Amino acid sequence: MRRESPRWSFMRSLWRDPEGSRRALLQFVREIVNRFCLELLSHFLCVTSEEKELMILTRRVRVVSFALGATVAAVLFAPKLFAQEKEPIDVVKVNTDLVVFDTQVIDKKTKRVIGDLTKEDFELSDNGVRQQISYFSRDELPLSIMLLLDVSGSVRPILHQIRDGALNALQRLKPEDRVAVMAFANTSRLAQDFTSDRKLAAQKIEEATASDALGRGTFLGSALESAAVHMQKAPAQTGRRVIIVVTDNIAMTPGRQTKDILDELFDTGTVVYGLIVRAAIGKVFNVMFLGQIKGVNEFVAQTGGEIVGADKNEVEAKLGAVIDRLRARYAIGFRPTDANDDVKFRRVEIRVAAAKKRTEKLVVLTKRGYYLRRR
């Protein structure tokens, strides 16, 4: 006799006892939601496995876990929802008449860096008005890199890969480069100021990733703000200032508004790169929230950096590739022909000249604009 399929069995029971079947289905859905909220709450509150089992057996705690889990989800969603109501924040402040933009050009399809362009290959417009490019450089300038390392609870399962990747990335630096190390979770801590001592930097990376004293949350906004403020100390007047954020990108509500953090980044001429390493919980979050947890993405887009994805075993290679790509950027500057208005935001567009376009589709990564600030 042919065995009845579970789907047909469910349909038959629904026909015979519709009210009872609906109640059973509703109870099943409730259990799934409760289980997910409990897992979410356990992660953020550092609940042990024994405590979690006790919570499962306690109906009242399960109700509380549902409410708190919904609150955590709302906290994660809120910045994205409110951000949709605001004007785009595209600001860079300059202190002289010469406005310089750090720029990278990549092949849209292959993501290959294009490093053989000349001044004549670019066109630049300021508030829609074509400008003459008065400064151009593609030199491999010294780097001042802040390694901003996520050490929160969600990356603990892959923290040793992050540590090893950061340690090996130090070998890509040149003698004239400087590196600083900052770790963050609930709070951030500067583990090492800018130094050219690779051995010292390696020691501080190991110490920073071995400690869980900073908590288990992921307050990326506050950490980026602290890193941006510290970038003022970077010896990069003739070099490039860069923050490389190594994180799973599951960020909680920032301490300050996005605009304030961007202002700090723009004031120091800092480019933000994001190396996104997905642990198991990060992949679950990304699926459950349909990719809406953007974390570092906005800061990367506004400063002209890149988002680079990596599996846990790719951290070393991808981080090294990011450092190599940083050396293939152009510095493009101009003097505004209409510099009377020093308050209104001025939108800048840099593109590859139409007459110079090649077969590949080229994308220009740079800041979106600036406020002209005179001394």
Image (spheres, helix red, strand yellow):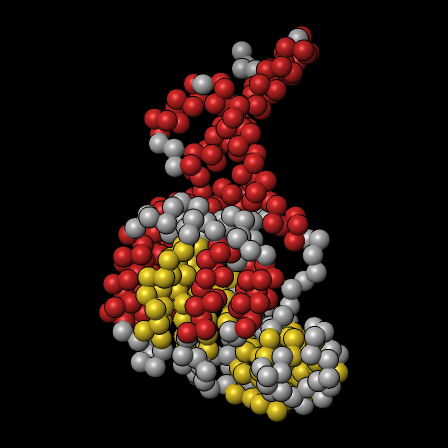
- Closer to us: 198 or 359: 198
Residue 188 spot, x, y in % from top left = 40, 56
Name the residue: 43% across, 49% down.
Answer: 186
Q: How many marks?
A: 0
Horizontal side, residue 168 vs residue 86: left or right? left
Q: Residue furthest front?
A: 375
83 left or right, relative to 37: right
Quarter of the image for the C terminus: give it: bottom right
Percent across and percent down for residue 284 are 49, 42
* Residue 347, position as x, y percentages in the image: 69, 74
Is any part of residue 66 visible from this angle? yes
Outermost residue toward the right in this view: 128
> In this rendering, is residue 65 above or below 104?
above
Query: Residue 140 appears in which quarter of the rendering?
Result: bottom left
Q: Residue furthest top?
A: 16
Observer-nearest residue: 142 or 29? Answer: 142
Query: Is residue 279 visible from the viewing direction of this image?
Result: no
* Residue at left offset 39%, top offset 24%: 53
* Residue at x 28%, y 52% (from the top left corner): 210
Front residue of 217 and 230: 230
Residue 154 occupies quadrant: top left
Residue at horizontal 40%, vertical 48%?
152
Q: Position of residue 107 (x, y in %)?
A: 57, 72
